[in-house]
Amino acid sequence: MTEQDSQHRGRLYGAFAFASVILACFSGYFFERRFYHAETLVIVTFGLGALYAALGVLSNECTESGKPALVTGYFVGQCVLLTALVFLSPIRGFFGIIVLPVVSQAIFDLSRRNALIVGLYLFVVSVGVWGVDFGLQSMLEVSFNYVPAFAFTVAFTLISKQALTAREQSEILRQELEVANQQLREHAAQVGELATTRERNRVAREIHDGVGHYLTVVKTQLDAASALMPTQPDKARDAVAKAAALTGEALEDVRRSVGSLRTDTARPLLPVSLRSLVRDAGLPVVVRVEGETRPIAPGVEHALFRAAQEGLTNIRKHAGATAAEVLLDFRKPHRLTLAFTDNGRGADGADATGFGLRGICERIEVLGGTVQSGNRPTGGFFLTIEVPA
């Protein structure tokens, strides 16, 4: 059942209850002949009752309008009608419960304070007519008879209102849950896409930093061999041999990367790996280690090794340098710094934002580290990487 259907059914139930109470109150006129002498009052009472019933059945148009003046006008008008009905009706006793539908409506549609005012006023009207007709003692006695009816109406209405409120809240929560589930599904899809993108980027970094580094060095050796072949064939053969050895290292690196891209736990300690890298750098490179060497997590060591490959490759390809330095600094507690400097020509905007540097930044940011790079005031380029370790 939709919320609109539920509201429509609730209105029908309310109208039925309203009409039922009015019919019950007026049924006494059809079984008593003693009211024939008050024919005019009976006609007026029936007319007022019909107006009261019409307003009650159509009350939703007023109470759901959201206009305070219209709601107030409805309840004031009904209270006036009920006062006239109760005092003009020739019937006493059971007829007094005709006010109860409006008491119930007031609890539903008004604030507690205003509902209390309406309820007390209609209670006074219901018992007050007995005081006018039969005196104060009779009014007090009738009050005890009317209290249970009013109390039952108030209690039943409050329970019904609480149930309806709980149902509305349940419906709101259900809708919010549907929205949240939809958002979770969309988020899960986005997470899946993001994970795929990150994995692709990781594979790209592995290929670029690993194979790309070795291919660059191999090309350097082969270019040297090509240049030396006519005049210095022995040195040319040495360069080709180095290129072959580097090709073998590249194949080993590819095997490590393809093996689910696991971190290379079999690689030597980072200072040893760095010294091995600089031997084939193509230019003099000094490796300095500051502080006491300590164990490094495999993932961190792998990322720094790849960063070192890329840093040395950039120096070789772009810097035009004649010397470079690599610093591995263990002096900060829980932090490790890897820095590269060269005496080359520095970098322009295009060189400073290449894929290699972006790949280094992505690797290091995943570890919670930082990357700084730029031209040195004294000439050349610097790259500083700091990671938790």
Image (spheres, rainbow, N blue to C red):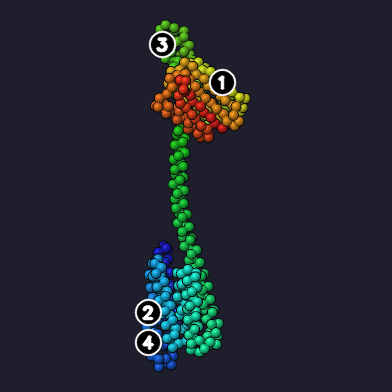
Q: Are marks 3 and 4 in contact (CB under 8 Å)?
A: no
Q: Are marks 2 and 1 in contact (CB under 8 Å)?
A: no
Considering only order in the chain, which callout, 3 or 1, is on the residue closer to the N terminus?
3
Considering only order in the chain, which callout, 1 or 2, is on the residue closer to the N terminus?
2
The spot of residue 290 in percent (x, y) is 59, 23
Q: Viewer-proximal residue, 76 or 364?
A: 76
Mark 3 secondary-structure assignment: helix
Few, some or many residues within 10 Å of mark 4 (<14, 14–19, 20+): few
Residue 288: give its label. Answer: 1
Q: Which residue is mark 4?
A: 43
Q: Are marks 4 and 1 in contact (CB under 8 Å)?
A: no
Q: CA distance from mark 2 to mark 1?
A: 101 Å
- The type of residue carrying mark 1 is Arg
- The type of residue carrying mark 4 is Ile
Q: Is residue 263 left or right of residue 10?
A: right
Q: Given this view, does label 1 or label 3 mark the residue nearer the observer?
A: 1
Mark yes or no: residue 171 visible.
yes
Q: CA distance from mark 3 to mark 4?
A: 125 Å
Q: Are marks 3 and 2 in contact (CB under 8 Å)?
A: no
